[in-house]
């Protein structure tokens, strides 16, 4: 696909995301010759910086990029860093938009970017609407000369109401087709591959329903704690930070019906339908029985003392924010009726891993000894990260007399594919937006449907009666009580890596 000449304006340019993800992704695109011929970046934020300061900060002196620049020719590096410019927006992102407009026009004229502009909102979310409205005031949202697109970082809303308000707020100034809500999990190859696994093969989809699937399990574990983001995280928690967005995106791809084709709206329509079919928990009993929350507590991992969540910097000493969430739910539609889904996400687990496990039902009549034992049933394990790949478990006969059945693995690793450049999530998503492809971005109704499901859980956790908060030692697979959620159905699969 051809990428039009364009200007990228990053709001929040002095923030961590710009240096850690956005600029390295642009650098990858630069190396892969995927940037358009005329392309410049204008950073904007509240810091007082010159163009030169900005180039040093995000390119030349950036700890995320510097090691990669070492063996490269100076003029090649300069070719990249010369694309970066900076504009100080003053105290509150509320003023100086006349100046910003002038700067945008100057850059556009000088570098022939044809009036095409992406605005990337990477500021605190409370500023999103302000920025959109100020851009509109100086007519920087007008598409009379070139297109305009708005990328919005997570978190998108804090609750159903705030997400709706944000959608309405942004849509006053930009049309839905101009708004790109980013969810970096959709930029992951393995997440996109869920669609291909299901809809480009004949061997899975016929079984992909309540007749053959016993339950679905999704685990997202991180070994790190909240790191330096305690202030943000304490107002968020695992459910908002990971589940509402990344994990429900994965759920929607597992649950959805086959789309007509691969056009953005065809795929997004099916995802919305999938999210709308999640059974919303209605009363305290349901919420109590199907949700578990917990916080990590101080512990010693590999001889090293680690802090408990409540001792982390920026976290309230009496915080009730969860660092672990496990949710059981059902999907009310023809395909999934009565199939339980178990989804958990947490920090300070023994390892970093994200995987989806499709647990198939036992054969309905057991002929061979041992063949009906639960852990010998067929499983399809989709490793989202790390060790990206797909593992299928099936029964084979143990050599020797009689018919003893053992489990064997068919295991595919992405790393075994011929050398291809696997794009980083942000790299892929940026390029898609640059080309106007919104398939891997969340639509307004999609985000709202996800919040519809999550909202009652959050409300219950905040104000319900008899809401339990469990603890788990940092470095273990969460609280033991989480086993109760899955008891009778199976047990959590705790992958070793
Ligand atoms: C982010 C969350 O969206 O995703 C972080 O805010 C989390 O808390 C991160 O660590 C996980 O992303 P990944 O790609 O490392 O799984």
Image (tube, helix red, strand yellow):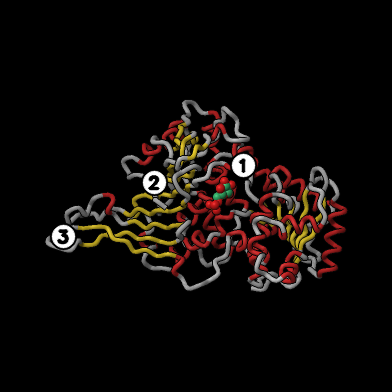
Q: Which residue is mark 3?
A: 403
Residue 87 percent across, percent down from the top left: 82, 54
Residue in the picture at 78% in, 53% down: 44
**Distance CA(mark 2)–CA(mark 3):** 32 Å
Question: Which residue has dot 1 on it?
Answer: 228
The residue at which mark 2 appears reads as: 340
Sequence-first disc among 2 and 3 = 2
Q: Is residue 478 left or right of residue 426?
A: left
Q: Kindly identify the residue that appears in the image at 77 percent across and 56 percent down.
A: 54
Of residues 131 and 38, the one drawn nearer to the viewer in this rendering: 38
Please name the residue shown 82% across and 55% down the image: 50
Q: Secondary structure at mark 1?
A: helix
**Picture quadrant of residue 266:** bottom right
State the mark number for residue 322.
Answer: none
At mark 2, the secondary structure is loop
Tags 2 and 1 touching, CB below 8 Å: no
- Image coordinates for residue 444, horizontal then vertical, percent: 62, 51
Q: Disc 2, ligand 1: is the CB inside 8 Å?
A: no
* Residue 464 visible in the displayed image: yes
Question: What kind of element bears circle 3?
Answer: loop
């Amino acid at each position: 696909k051809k990428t039009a000449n364009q200007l990228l304006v990053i709001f929040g340019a002095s923030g961590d995301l710009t240096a850690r993800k956005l600029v390295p992704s642009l650098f990858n695109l630069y190396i892969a010759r995927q940037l358009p011929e005329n392309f410049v970046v204008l950073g904007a934020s509240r810091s007082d910086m010159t163009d030169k300061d900005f180039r040093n900060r995000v390119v030349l002196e950036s700890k995320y990029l510097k090691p990669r620049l070492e063996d490269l020719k100076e003029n090649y590096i300069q070719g990249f860093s010369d694309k970066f410019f900076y504009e100080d927006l003053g105290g509150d992102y509320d003023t100086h938009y006349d100046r910003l407009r002038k700067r945008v026009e100057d850059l556009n004229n000088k570098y022939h970017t044809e009036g095409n502009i992406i605005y990337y909102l990477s500021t605190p979310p409370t500023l999103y609407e302000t920025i959109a409205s100020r851009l509109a005031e100086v007519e920087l949202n007008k598409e009379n000369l070139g297109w305009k697109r708005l990328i919005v970082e997570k978190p998108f809303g804090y609750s159903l109401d705030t997400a709706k308000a944000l959608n309405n707020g942004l849509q006053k100034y930009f049309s839905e087709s101009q708004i790109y809500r980013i969810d970096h999990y959709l930029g992951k190859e393995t997440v996109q591959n869920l669609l291909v696994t299901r809809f480009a093969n004949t061997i899975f989809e016929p079984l992909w329903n309540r007749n053959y699937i016993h339950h679905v399990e999704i685990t997202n574990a991180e070994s790190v704690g909240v790191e330096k983001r305690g202030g943000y995280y304490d107002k968020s928690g695992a459910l908002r930070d990971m589940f509402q967005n990344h994990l429900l995106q994965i759920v929607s791809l597992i649950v959805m019906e086959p789309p007509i084709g691969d056009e953005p709206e065809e795929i997004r329509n099916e995802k919305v339908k999938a999210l709308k079919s999640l059974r919303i928990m209605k009363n305290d009993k349901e919420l109590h029985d199907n949700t578990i929350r917990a916080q990590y507590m101080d512990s010693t991992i590999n001889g090293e003392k680690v802090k408990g969540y409540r001792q982390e910097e920026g976290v309230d000493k009496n915080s009730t924010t969860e660092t672990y969430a496990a949710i059981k739910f059902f999907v009310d539609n023809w395909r999934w009726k009565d199939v339980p889904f178990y989804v958990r996400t947490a920090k300070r687990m023994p390892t970093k891993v994200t995987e989806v496990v499709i647990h198939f039902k036992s054969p309905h009549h057991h002929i061979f000894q041992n063949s009906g034992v639960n852990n010998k049933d067929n499983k399809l394990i989709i490793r989202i990260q790390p060790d990206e790949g797909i593992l299928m478990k099936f029964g084979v006969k143990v050599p020797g007399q009689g018919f003893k059945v053992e489990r064997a693995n068919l295991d595919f690793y992405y790393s075994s594919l011929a050398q291809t450049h696997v794009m980083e999530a942000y790299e892929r998503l940026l390029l898609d937006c640059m080309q106007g492809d919104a398939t891997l971005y969340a639509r307004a109704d999609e985000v709202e449907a996800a919040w519809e499901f999550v909202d009652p859980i959050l409300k219950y956790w905040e104000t319900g009666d008899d809401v339990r908060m469990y603890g788990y030692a940092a470095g273990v697979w969460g609280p033991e009580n989480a086993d109760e959620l899955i008891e009778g159905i199976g047990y959590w699969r705790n992958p070793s890596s």
